[in-house]
Amino acid sequence: MTLLNQDGVHVAADGEVATVTLTNPAKRNAQTPATWRALAEAGRVLPGTVRVVVLRGEGKSFSAGLDRQAFEPEGFDGEPSFLDLARGGDEELDAAIAEYQEAFTWWRRPDLISVAAVQGHAIGAGFQLALACDLRVCARDVQFAMRETSLGLVPDLTGTHPLVSLVGQARALEICATGRFVHAEEAERVGLANLVVPADELDGAVTDLAAALLAAPRGAVVETKALLAGAGTRSYDEQRAAERAAQARRLRDLAGLGD
């Protein structure tokens, strides 16, 4: 069932699995502000029955990042260019970037598990979109790169937090400051990729992973995701307490005593 089809973003749901597809392969799924608004809307149109969201890009590349037309004086039709935004006030600029970030923030919602199926180039905004997801399954031809610093910018589409969480601050700094490519073998070794497969097996591997993620009861998966998401900011004793509280809720639910 198609839920959304606009500005290079297609969203469809099939039972408990939804698929969000970037559909501009002619431009290697380059992203624009319109793309980001459509991606933000994708999170709002998902039915409550969806448990797993798969993010993919049509063609040879997942996403080559920001469409460079954003830096041209004329920008995009009906859109201010980034140069125009820079000339505006601080509040307007902050609000514009916050709106762009909304496309990247909903993928780690507690009620969902999101899986990025990444092939070819995932550069800049494309890298950050893959990082926005909970999990990443990558083809062997994948090439991650964070090129913002090379352009005199910073990664501002929510990618810095998950990148540091996955690979550590020192490696994240080196990847961002150099703008170099991270290929499949390294991505798997340092934790950027949960699984690496041949390109022609990418869709099958993601389908198998989605099925495995759906095997456990939804409540148990939601509670486990919340426990793991908070573990890094809790003390050992706080995490023990959180585990006890979560398990009590699960036991009561299994006993038919839940809310």
Image (cartoon, grey):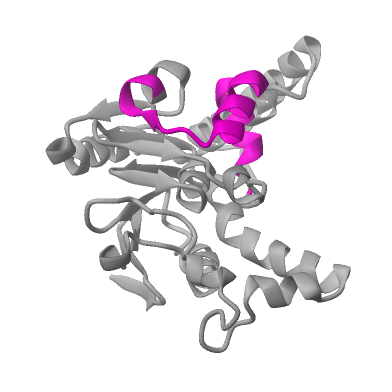
The residue under the point 49% across, 46% down is: 112
Picture layout, residue 112 above or below residue 223: below
In the displayed image of the protein, which residue is found farthest to the top? 236
Image side of residue 134 versus residue 100, left or right: left
Q: Nearer the viewer, residue 206 or 100?
A: 100
Image side of residue 94 versus residue 121, left or right: right
Picture layout, residue 69 above or below residue 174: below
Q: Nearer the viewer, residue 112 or 71?
A: 71
In the displayed image of the protein, which residue is found farthest to the right? 90
Q: Nearer the viewer, residue 53 or 196?
A: 196
Residue 23: image x %, image y %?
30, 66
Asked whether residue 110 appears in the rendered view, the answer is: no
Residue 53: image x %, image y %?
40, 51
Is 171 within the magenta? yes
The residue under the point 56% across, 89% down is: 78
Is 182 within the magenta? yes
The residue under the point 28% across, 44% down is: 120
Quarter of the figure with residue 2: bottom left
Quarter of the figure with residue 139: top left
Q: Quadrant of the N terminus?
A: bottom left
The residue under the point 42% across, 37% down is: 144
Residue 76: image x %, image y %?
52, 81
Image side of residue 111 versus residue 144, left or right: right
Residue 87: image x %, image y %?
79, 75
Magenta span covers which residues? 158-186
Q: Which SS type dominates the magenta stretch?
A: helix
Asked whether residue 201 appears in the rendered view, the answer is: yes
In the displayed image of the protein, which residue is found farthest to the left? 200
Q: Nearer the viewer, residue 244 or 116?
A: 116
